[in-house]
């Protein structure tokens, strides 16, 4: 079964490197040092104009907490409009409540704003205590996939929980493994967890993605 490799990139140069390495999809962010924030319209447009693979755009107004104020949610709604206007193929969001659970109301609203564009819930998911319940809430809210390490320090360490999430999500929602995914461990993560999507940083080295693609293509 095919494994989709998504490369996290923060610049036009990184986007080109990831595509050269064989990535199937990009996650485009800025400020990767704080986990990624919404990229500017100019960067979205530039990347979309030059790569041939789908581009998933991060919608996150700042680093830090995933609990967002009303003003920040308004900014996210506007950023969704900008991202879609510049050709985003997918969107990436993540909103929690002060109680540390998925903010289902805000998530439903943002998914509605996305229209037919698929939405991924990012690694804010790894901060919730009950991940199985959170997965159900996200599926009910219309989220297409969740990016997670299973709450562990790395996707390989979280492989058993990832397998539970894959089984729980079924056909309702996809589970994408992220967290120190490399060429030497990608195949083992897929084997143990059953995920069919992997997320990894590219930086400026196409070989980082190429090794992951090759590992997941080996029979």
Image: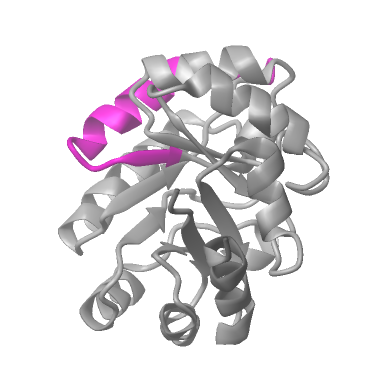
Give the residue at x 62% y 32%. Answer: 125
* Front in this rendered view, residue 195 or 32: 195
Residue at the image point whose x is 35% and y is 48% from the top: 91
Q: Which quarter of the figure has residue 143?
A: top left
Looking at the image, is 75 positioned above or below residue 26?
above
Q: Position of residue 105 (x, y in %)?
A: 41, 16
Relative depth, front residue between 132 and 29: 132
Q: Is residue 31 above or below residue 78?
A: below
Up/down of 29 relative to 108, above or below: below
Give the position of the C terminus as an image quadrant: bottom right
> Can residue 202 be seen in the rendering of this structure?
no
Q: Position of residue 3 (x, y in %)?
A: 48, 54
Q: Is residue 30 left or right of residue 177?
A: left
**Which residue is farthest front?**
219
Drawn side of residue 97 relative to residue 7, left or right: right
Query: Looking at the rendering, which quadrant does residue 82 occupy?
Result: bottom left
Q: Is residue 100 magenta?
A: yes
| Magenta highlight range | 99-120
User: For the image shown, how many numbered marks are present on the structure?
Assistant: 0
Q: How is the image coloured?
A: one colour
Question: Quick check: is 172 in the magenta stretch?
Answer: no
Q: Residue 17: x and y, percent? A: 48, 85
Res. 108 image quadrant? top left
Which residue is located at x 22 percent, y 49 percent? 81
């Amino acid at each position: 079964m095919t494994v989709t490799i998504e490369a996290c990139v923060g610049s036009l140069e990184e986007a080109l490197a990831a595509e050269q390495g064989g990535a199937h999809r990009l996650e485009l962010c800025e400020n990767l040092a704080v986990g990624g924030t919404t990229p500017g319209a100019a960067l979205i447009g530039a990347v979309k104009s030059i790569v041939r693979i789908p581009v998933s755009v991060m919608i996150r107004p700042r680093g830090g907490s995933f609990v967002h104020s009303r003003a920040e949610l308004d900014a996210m709604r506007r950023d969704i409009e900008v991202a879609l206007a510049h050709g985003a193929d997918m969107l990436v969001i993540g909103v929690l409540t002060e109680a540390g659970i998925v903010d289902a109301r805000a998530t439903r609203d943002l998914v509605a704003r996305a229209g037919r564009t698929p939405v991924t819930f990012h690694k804010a998911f790894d901060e919730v205590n009950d991940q199985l319940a959170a997965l159900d809430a996200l599926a009910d809210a219309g989220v297409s996939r969740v990016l997670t390490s299973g709450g562990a320090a790395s996707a390989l360490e979280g492989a058993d929980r990832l397998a539970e999430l894959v089984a729980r999500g079924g056909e309702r929602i996809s589970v994408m493994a992220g967290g120190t995914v490399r060429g030497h461990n990608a195949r083992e993560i897929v084997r143990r967890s059953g995920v069919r999507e992997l997320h990894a940083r590219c930086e400026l080295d196409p070989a980082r993605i190429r090794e992951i693609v090759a590992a997941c293509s080996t029979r």
